[in-house]
Amino acid sequence: MKVAVFSLGGCEGCRYSLVEALLSAGDLGLELVHEPLLDLESESYDVAVVEGPVESQEDVNKLLEIRQRAKILVALGSCAVLGGVPGLAETVDKEYGPSRPLRAAPLSRYVRVDYWVRGCPPKREELLRVLKWISEGSPLKLGERELVYCREVTTSVVGTLFKLDGEKCIVCGRCVRVCEEMGVSALGYAHRSIEVAITTPLEVSFDGSLCVACGQCLLYCPVGALREVNALGELLQSVRAGVLREVYIEPEALAGIAASLSVPPGKVVAALKALGLRRVVVWKPPLTVKEGAMIIPASMAEYFYVKKLYPELLSLTAKPDLGLKRGTALVTACVARRLEHSLVVTARDLLRAARCLDVDAFPERPPDETRLGEEPELPKAVGPSKVREVLESLKSGCSIDGPVVLYLCPGGCLEGGGQPYPEEATREAKEKALRLVLGGVKQLVKQCTK
């Protein structure tokens, strides 16, 4: 059988990532005859693999022609299956003319689709599995029914800190994979076949699930379907009302914002002043060390991790206490800090406000005060695997050499769930900015007071 590959709207990332897999079609008894990326063009084919959503009348006409020629049509990737990222737009620019639909749509809205290969981009193995079924002449398993995709119902989840918008979700699975790597599995797949959705077990709220509020899933959702319930508006409103004049900012959060804006930390301090804050204090939250405690959580995320997954060790665990007075705000790299203080804004959200300012034009300014304190010399377990190793050791009855501090996020607080998105700043850039914050505060003050 002859295979042809076509692209409608979208970014064509599916095709680029799966060219090698498509070349393997020959090993399955299928001949690739149409793929412009490989300079192959033919109007005669049996199987059509189509990526991208339908975005215009031209796409509709092209798709109808493909469907008429092909015996089997495969929708490739989230855009072709669900509408993908283009399908999130409510309207389009008028320059496209009246023939352009208001929203990008999946292929199944216009033609019959025989197979769906999900993902953004899809997995190579899944595409090869479908092609193998086709080559063997047994595409459907015994007793299985063909279903027409229709996204009439979506699954959304809310919580105190997070919300999952099922209308935006493209079921790429990144959040599920990250949650599994954290050892939590608060997110997973629900329903079957083409109605599959990402949600919490039994579709309960985040608060009622195993979610520990680490926020790592928020960093890797490519379409913003997973978002935090932020407090940026409350902070800016309090500043405008004259209620809030002082902000505490963690060194990692200051480094994350500075690295994302590609400016020295002193310019971020100046930007905070420009927003109306009179005092900016660089502050490192103290660790809560209590007598008899063997587990020292760096934040409520680690505390919930123990409480929900290792409840038998809770009596050995100290509960975090920031000790901040009311009427102050905290800018943090950790989403879970919002469970410890009344007004907390993540570095990611404050970055949104900073982008509205010409930060690069500001002169560097030193913080009004620096309270980094002295942490006790305690062993640290950084990252989910090290944290599990310590907790499993305690659970099995093995003793450890004194208290140990747990940092659940991979890479510690510098890679916290409240930091800017990974594509906005590399780890190297954040580490460089953090060195300026921690090691060069005195030098920064000296430079700015000359």
Image (cartoon, helix red, strand yellow):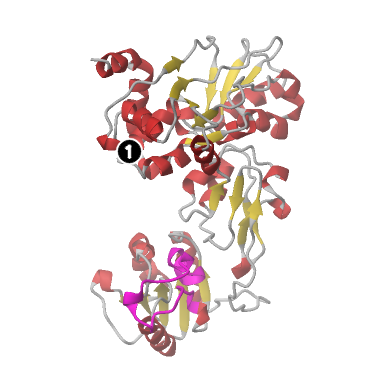
In-front residue for pair 48/345: 345
Q: Position of residue 24 (x, y in %)?
A: 37, 66
**Residue denoted by label 1:** 261
| Residue 182 visible from this viewpoint | yes
Which residue shows up at 32% across the image and 32% down it? Answer: 429
Dot 1 amino acid type: Leu
Q: Is residue 429 above or below residue 205?
A: above
Extent of the magenta region: 78-107
> Which residue is drawn at the image coordinates 61% and 56% (left, top)?
198
Q: State which quadrant residue 11 falls in.
A: bottom left
Instruction: Please state which of residues 304 and 2 is positioned toward the viewer in this rendering.
Output: 304
* Residue lying at 26% horizontally and 76% vertically, measured from the top left: 40
Q: Residue furthest front?
A: 242
Task: Determine the residue positioned at 43% across, 40% down.
Answer: 420
In the rendered image, is residue 113 in sight?
no
Image quarter in which the N terminus is found: bottom left
Residue 137 location (% of width, % of height): 52, 79
Determine if the magenta segment contains residue 425.
no
Above or below for 156 versus 181: below
| Nearer to the camera, 134 or 308 | 308
- Residue 286 in percent (x, y) is at 56, 17
| Residue 415 against residue 16 in the figure, above or below | above
Where 181 sits versus 120, above or below?
above
As for residue 96 lying within the magenta part, the answer is: yes
